Amino acid sequence: MPDDPGGGGGDGPRDPELPAGRRSEHQPLHGRARREPRGAARARGLPGGVRVRHAEPGDLGRVIALATEVIGAERAGTFIRSYAERHHLLVAEENGEVAGVLAFRTDWFQCTFVGLVGVDANLRRRGVARALYGMVEEISPSPRLFSSTEETNAVSIRMHTALGFAPSGYIDNLPQGYRELLFYKRLRPASAG
């Protein structure tokens, strides 16, 4: 939803500590943002030699290629660049090569929403997606994490269940012609510090 001019919203309850009106682009929605994990936390649950980190400009070619497999060439470039500009793009790297990508946003109804996950076809079922989700859970400023997949994507539905997500509804009438299933996971509150 990079072209969503409202950037999320909704009329649900607001965090009482949030200032009224518009926040700057880098001001967290829910008090202090979580700190980026260091050292071993970056590689927890990954095959040997793999780490998760924020995407860098040199990663964009490979990241766009992975995104193209998920959302098509006509959308991938614009989609990925918009997430990269907001520093909401994570990559899993193995031996210096990008093996997976996760794009997220933190302004979706004051929640964190995963908009895209893509893993190299040769590295699937090895914990790469799990590690990407683990990182977004650690850095999410919100205790509410949402994700989605098409109703026809049985592999993704099983993955969300295995990662502890619960079904949270669906969206009809989208351009792809399939129902988009929403998943929800409650995270531990961010630690003060």
Image (cartoon, grey):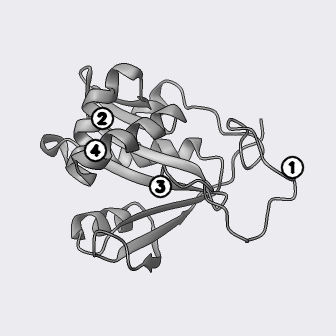
Q: Is residue 144 left or right of residue 101?
A: right
Question: Circle 2: is it few (<14), some (14-19), or many (20+) Cα within 10 Å?
Answer: many
Q: Name the residue rendered at 87%, 58% in the picture.
A: 16
Of badges 3 and 2, nearer the viewer stands 3
| Figure check: 121 above or below 113 | above
Is residue 45 visible in the rendered structure shown here? no
Question: How far apart, in angstroms, are the residues tagged by discs 3 and 4?
Answer: 14 Å
Residue wearing tag 1:
19
Question: How far apart, in angstroms, are the residues tagged by discs 1 and 3?
Answer: 25 Å
Q: Earlier in the sequence, mark 3 or mark 4?
A: 3
- Find numbered disc 3 in the image and state the secondary structure of the residue it sits on: loop
Disc on res. 63:
2
Q: Name the residue rendered at 39%, 44% in the picture.
A: 79
Q: Is residue 149 left or right of residue 187?
A: left
Question: Circle 4: is it few (<14), some (14-19), or many (20+) Cα within 10 Å?
Answer: many
Q: Earlier in the sequence, mark 4 or mark 1?
A: 1
Q: Earlier in the sequence, mark 2 or mark 1?
A: 1
**Residue 99 image point, x, y percent:** 25, 35
The amino acid type of the residue labelled 1 equals: Pro
Residue wearing tag 3:
1
Confirm or deny contact between disc 4 and disc 2 (CB under 8 A).
yes
**Residue 10 image point, x, y percent:** 68, 68
Q: Name the residue rendered at 34%, 19% in the picture.
A: 58
Q: Earlier in the sequence, mark 3 or mark 2?
A: 3
The amino acid type of the residue labelled 4 equals: Ala
Disc on res. 67:
4
Q: Quadrant of residue 187?
A: bottom right
